[in-house]
Every structure is written in C-alpha cells, then in structure tokens.
C-alpha cells in the first residue's frame, strides 16, 4: 500500500484562524444583533491602485490579439519587471542588485516556503519567536525540524530567537549556530522594525559563520524612518549571505492577484561535496523546473507599481492604513495598554493586561467589546501574553473599536 510522507504527519494542526472563526461564529449565533468589528485580518481591504487597473486592462487587451498575445512567460520573469524592481527597489537605494538576480514569482508565501528546498537536509534553521508559521512548517515538511514537543510547542532541531518587549522585538544573535536564519522586518506579527545597525550585526554574523539569511521584506513599504532599512542589501556584505523576499501583496494590494520576487545575488555560495556552488544557479534550476512563470498581465500590473502614478497611489493606500495604525496605537495607549508596532507596520502588538493569556484576552475583547483580534500565542510561545490588531480595517471601524475598548476598561 502507498505510504505517506511522515514528515507531513508530524505537523500539529493549525488551529489559530479556525479557532478564531469558530469562536466568532459561536458568539454571533448567541448574540444575533452583535456588530462585530474584525481587526484580526492579515489581508488588505483597499482596492488596487488605478495605475495597476489600467495596466491590467491594457495587458488583457494585448492577450486578445494575435500580434500582442503572450504565452508562457520566461520562467524567471519578464525583463521589464525585473529591471523595474532592480532599479526602483535596489539601485535607487544604493543596493547593488542586477536585474537577473531577481526571480519573479507568484508571491512571498510560496517563495518563503520553497526556498528551503535548495539547502541540505541537515541544515539547522533559526527563527524568531513569535514567527510567520510558513518558515517553520515548510522545514517540518522537509524533515529538517526534528521532533515536536507539545508542552513547549517547539521543534528539537529549530533554533528559536525570542522577540519580546525587553529586546525591542529584535532577537539576540542565536545561541547555537544555525545554517539558515529567517528574519522578517518590519515584522509580522509583532509590528517591530529593525535598524540598519541591528541588521548589520546579523549580516556580519552570517558571513562569519557561513550561514544564509532569508530576509522577508514583505512590509518594507510601511517604513517611515530613514534609519530603518528597506532591504537587507543596504548592509555591507549582504550579497554574500542574504536572500531577500519581496511581495506586491501588502503594499499594492496584490493578495488576490499574486506577485512576488526572490532576490539571490550571484556572490551567494554554499558548500557542496565538491567545493562551493552559487545559490543563484540552483534556484534558477529549481524555478525553471517547477514553475512556469507569473502571468503576463500580472507582471504588467507589477510594472505599473513603479510608474510615477503607481508609486503615488500606493503611498496613498499605505498612508490610509497607517492612519488606522496610529489611531489604534494612540487609542490603546490612552486606554492604558502597553502597545508596540504600528509605526513601520500595519500591525499593532499589545501586551495583554493583568497577565491574561492571549486567548483569555481574545475572549474578553469579543465578549465585552465585540472586537476580534489575533492571539499572540498562535504565532509561537513567546507570543503568549501578547495580542495582534491590524490596521487593514476601515478608519471608522478602527475608531469604533477604540471607543469600545476604552469603555471596556471601565467595566473590567
Ligand atoms: C503577507 C505576508 C507575506 C506575503 O505573502 P504573499 O504570498 O506575497 O501574499 C509574506 N511574508 C509575511 C510575513 C507576510 O505577513
């Protein structure tokens, strides 16, 4: 009889968002008239920028005529998009990245999941705790994580780097030496940012120890301070130790359209049995074998994000979310909460009051304020006693949520 990949069977169930949905549904069933405000969502709500819509229409029409029709896209991406990204995201920021070091994909989730494939089976990974679950789960599927301990909610071969208020949500260098280090800044879920000096320490550490950093820059567009790097390649020496993931989801609203990119500099090498090999050529081989390219119309839409109009419209969308974030952040502070994030990120990360667990706070917020957020413990053990609210709702709902949370404080 056929057998299954036992590594997949090791994965504990992913109950976070299904448990939230169940609890909200149960509450709604008991309180038919409750007007629930959902600030748990990690998805954008604003429509696509007009420049993107126009580019999509134009590209769709091109697909309808034999002269301009395009079939399979080049596996690694159309040069018009690779060039636009290299120029705008990198060279204009002083980062030395060539067009052909950018691999276009359907998003940062799949790239962050797939990238581990090109590394050795016994490589050890280090992740922040709390963390975006994809990094760990995909290494579990690949058999790289060891065994799961239900009590500590950790994997035996994964190195955890706690991110808590005490270290400003930027981890210390790992205690044990990893081969692969996952970093995401600005961070989901904590909303924390990393300074260039702090990131430089990780780059120096990786170069010294022969490790690779996988840097998830999905939220770079939310950065509002010049001391905070938009790319890891702003650090010296990053070309020999870092892979960067980019997404069009959280800046330009492509969560449903799907577009992203992975950057692998040609200077990045790894040890093989015969010596050293470029990661660039291995990822190109992997991409060419397993992927047939992001859709032409979507890549044209991505290109439009770099036009003057596109940039301006994206800025307006981000500003709109950041106005919500500022409102949530200040409102929670006024209500007496200890709050973090929300400055370079659409996520506000609060410490639960009175040492409540993340789930106790979830239940109280739903029951007393009819506001839904995300329990921090769902992102890892060091997320316990924290709680995430997102700025992706409407301004009106952000204001109403704060009113209710302030009122709740009085009854607590
Ligand atoms: C939303 C998000 C992404 C983006 O994923 P896409 O597949 O590009 O939509 C990547 N990383 C993190 C941490 C995210 O929160």
Image (cartoon, grey):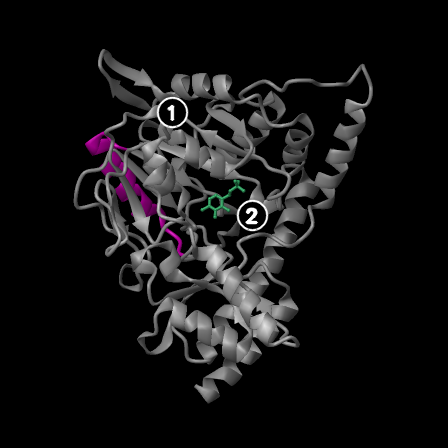
Q: Secondary structure at mark 1?
A: loop
Residue 168 at least partly seen: no
- At label 1, counting other C-alpha atoms closer than 10 Å, the crowd grade (few under 14, some 14-19, many 20 or more) is few
Q: Residue lying at the far left in this picture: please name it.
A: 176
Residue at (53, 21) in percent of width and height: 76
Look at 48% across and 17% down and name the residue there.
289
The residue labelled by disc 1 is: 1
Find residue 34 and report its horizontal and vertical position in percent. Answer: 62, 76
The main secondary structure of the magenta stretch is: helix
Magenta stretch: residue 194 in it? yes
Q: Nearer the viewer, residue 134 or 153?
A: 153
SS for tag 2? Answer: helix
| 354 vs 120: above or below | below
Q: Is residue 83 left or right of residue 63?
A: left
Vertical order, 309 against 227 (above or below):
above
- Left or right, 374 with reference to 46: left
Percent position of residue 124, x then y: 24, 35
Task: Give the residue number, with chain letter if any, for mark 2.
Answer: 250
Q: Is residue 151 magenta?
A: no
Which region is colored magenta?
A: 192-211
Compared with 320, 412 (above or below) is below
Horizontal and vertical percent for residue 27? 55, 72
Q: Which x, y percent locates residue 246?
A: 49, 37
Q: Does residue 101 appear anywhere in the picture?
A: yes
Can you name the residue that lies furthest to the bottom here?
Answer: 410
Please report the residue visible at 54 percent of the width from the left and 57 percent of the height from the top. 41
The yes-or-no answer for disc 1 within 8 Å of ligand 1 is: no
Disc 2 C-beta below 8 A from ligand 1? yes
């Amino acid at each position: 009889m056929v057998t299954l990949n036992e590594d997949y069977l090791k994965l504990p169930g992913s109950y976070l968002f299904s448990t939230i949905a169940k609890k909200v549904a149960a509450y709604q069933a008991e309180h038919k008239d409750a007007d629930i405000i959902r600030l748990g969502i990690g998805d954008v709500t604003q429509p696509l920028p007009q420049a993107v819509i126009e580019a999509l229409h134009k590209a769709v029409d091109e697909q309808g005529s034999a002269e301009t029709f395009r079939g399979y896209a080049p596996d690694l991406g159309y040069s018009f998009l690779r060039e636009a990204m290299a120029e705008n995201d990198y060279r204009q920021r002083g980062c030395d990245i060539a067009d052909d070091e950018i691999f276009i994909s359907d998003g940062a989730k799949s790239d962050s999941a797939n990238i581990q494939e090109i590394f050795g089976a016994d490589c050890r990974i280090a992740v922040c705790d709390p963390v975006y679950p994809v990094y760990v789960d995909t290494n579990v599927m690949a058999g790289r994580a060891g065994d799961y301990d239900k009590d500590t909610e950790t994997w035996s071969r994964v190195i955890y780097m706690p991110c808590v208020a005490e270290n400003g949500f930027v981890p210390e260098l790992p205690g044990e030496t990893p081969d692969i280090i996952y970093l995401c800044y600005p961070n989901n879920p904590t909303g924390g940012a990393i300074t260039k000096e702090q990131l430089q320490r990780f780059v120096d550490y990786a170069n010294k120890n022969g490790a690779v950093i996988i840097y998830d820059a999905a939220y770079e567009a939310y950065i509002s301070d010049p001391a905070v790097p938009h790319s890891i390649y702003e650090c010296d020496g990053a070309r020999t130790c870092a892979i960067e993931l980019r997404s069009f989801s959280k800046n330009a609203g492509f969560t449903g359209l799907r577009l992203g990119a992975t950057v692998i500099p040609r200077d990045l090498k790894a040890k093989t049995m015969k010596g050293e090999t470029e990661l660039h050529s291995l990822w190109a081989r992997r991409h060419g074998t397993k992927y047939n390219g992001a859709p032409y119309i979507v890549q044209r839409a991505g290109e439009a994000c770099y036009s003057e109009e596109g940039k301006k419209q994206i800025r307006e969308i981000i500003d709109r979310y950041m106005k919500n974030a500022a409102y949530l952040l200040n409102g929670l502070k006024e209500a007496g909460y200890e709050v973090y994030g929300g400055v370079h990120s659409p996520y506000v990360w609060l410490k639960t009051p009175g040492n409540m667990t993340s789930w106790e706070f979830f239940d109280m917020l739903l029951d007393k304020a009819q506001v839904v957020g995300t329990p921090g413990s769902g992102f890892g053990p060091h997320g316990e006693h924290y709680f995430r609210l997102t700025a992706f709702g409407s301004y009106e709902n952000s204001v109403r949520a704060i009113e209710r949370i302030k009122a709740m404080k009085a009854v607590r």
